Image (spheres, rainbow, N blue to C red):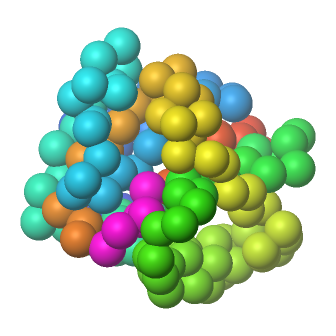
């Protein structure tokens, strides 16, 4: 255990977050996301039993969002014709606003298959047990200034 580090962040996940450099991307995937397929060229970390919001909140305590791009947070857009609701996105926006002064402005919605293509270039994919649909979120890492 470490002081000041959220306990939900496993040693494996902390190592990966630390290894990531500026502009590397991290996918926090819901339980339906094809994590192993999309992440075959990335590091896949299992976080079964954890929700995306809980992990997002903990990760953003130690992980800066990129300030050199306008939209460092990507959400998987709901497919046209899909009757899905995405209340989990409101949770994400509240969590991000606590850690980044830009608030909602950092979010973009990416078409489902374009999201998959973007995710294939991610440094790491965290496979969660999240049951909400369209709950996938991608973060682009920024620079830590003054540690």
- The single residue placed furthest to the front in the displayed view is 81
Q: Identify whether 106 is placed above or below 17.
A: below
Would you say residue 61 is visible in this rendering? no
Name the spot of residue 122 as percent of width and height, x first.
50, 28
Q: Identify whether 101 is placed above or below 64.
A: below
Name the spot of residue 2 as percent of width and height, x first.
27, 58
Which portion, as a residue range, is magenta? Answer: 132-136
Q: Nearer the viewer, residue 58 or 45?
A: 45
**Secondary structure that dominates the magenta span:** loop
Would you say residue 69 is visible in this rendering? yes
Q: Residue at x 40, y 31 (%)?
A: 124
Name the spot of residue 83 as percent of width and height, x first.
46, 77
Q: Nearer the viewer, residue 34 or 43?
A: 34
- The single residue placed furthest to the left in the displayed view is 49
Quadrant in which the N terminus appears: bottom left
Residue 139 lies left or right of residue 120; in this view the side is right
Residue 92 lies left or right of residue 96; in this view the side is left
Q: Residue at x 63, y 78 (%)?
A: 93
**How many numbered discs?**
0
Residue 124 forms part of the magenta stretch: no
Location of residue 89 (image quadrant): bottom right
- The single residue placed furthest to the top in the displayed view is 41
Q: Nearer the viewer, residue 76 or 10?
A: 76
Q: Residue at x 18, y 62 (%)?
A: 129
Name the spot of residue 99 as percent of width and height, x first.
66, 72
Location of residue 75 (image quadrant): bottom right
Q: Residue at x 64, y 41 (%)?
A: 140
Q: Identify whether 25 is placed above or below 79.
A: above
């Amino acid at each position: 255990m470490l002081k000041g580090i959220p306990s939900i962040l496993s040693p494996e996940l902390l190592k990966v977050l630390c290894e990531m450099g500026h502009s590397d991307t991290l996918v926090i995937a819901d339980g339906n996301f094809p994590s192993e397929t999309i992440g075959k060229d990335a590091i896949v970390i299992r976080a079964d039993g954890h929700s995306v919001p809980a992990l997002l909140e903990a990760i953003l305590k130690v992980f800066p969002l990129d300030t050199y791009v306008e939209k460092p947070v990507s959400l998987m857009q709901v497919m046209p014709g899909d009757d899905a609701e995405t209340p989990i996105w409101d949770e994400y926006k509240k969590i991000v606003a606590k850690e980044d002064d830009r608030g909602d402005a950092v979010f973009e919605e990416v078409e489902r298959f374009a999201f998959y293509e973007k995710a294939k270039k991610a440094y790491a994919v965290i496979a969660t047990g999240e049951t909400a649909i369209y709950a996938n979120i991608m973060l682009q890492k920024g620079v830590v200034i003054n540690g």
